[in-house]
Amino acid sequence: MSKPKDTDGSAAETAELPFEEAIKRLEAIVEAMESQDLPLETLLARYQEGSRLAQLCQAKLNEAELKVQQLEKNSKGELILKPINASAQETV
């Protein structure tokens, strides 16, 4: 059973997706899984792709949150990027 190229969702392609595209793809996968009568093999493939996309989105959100947490105002009221130590990153 062959799949269209745009639904392949290999791990390498998934890792390169911007956050917004990953969310859109994840939403499309969920909608297709809920609304279509798909064979088990296709459902499993989409589930795996969805899992990769969800992990990618979570990692990107964690990274963005860390960057926001690093922002700090200096004495002039300007936002600056505050260095963060490695142990703080591991707890996020």
Image (tube, grey):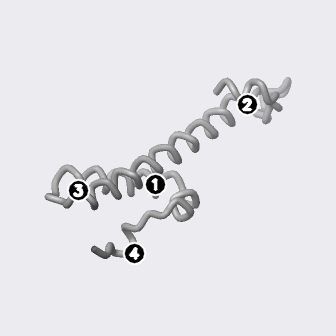
Residue at image location 53% in from the left, 64% down from the top? 13
Residue 83 is situated, as x and y percent measured from the top left of the image, at 83, 32
Note whether 39 is above or below 67 in the view shown.
Answer: below
Give the Cα separation between the discs numbered 3 and 1: 23 Å
Under mark 1, the amino acid is Ala
Query: Toward which corner of the image does residue 68 lie, by quadrant?
Result: top right
Q: Which residue is mark 4?
A: 5
Dividing the image into 4 quarters, which one contains the N terminus?
A: bottom left
Foreground tag (4 vs 2): 4
| Numbered tag placed on residue 4 in the rendering | none
Which residue is under mark 1? Answer: 22
Name the residue tied to disc 2.
70
Front position among marks 4 and 3? 3
Tell whether 42 sits left or right of 8: left
User: Amino acid under label 3?
Assistant: Leu
- Label whose residue precedes the other's in the sequence (2 or 3): 3
The reply to whether discs 4 and 1 touch (Cβ–Cβ < 8 Å) is: no
Q: Give the distance between the C-alpha atoms of the residues marked 4 and 2, in whole angstroms.
A: 40 Å
Quote the CA–CA distance across marks 2 and 1.
25 Å
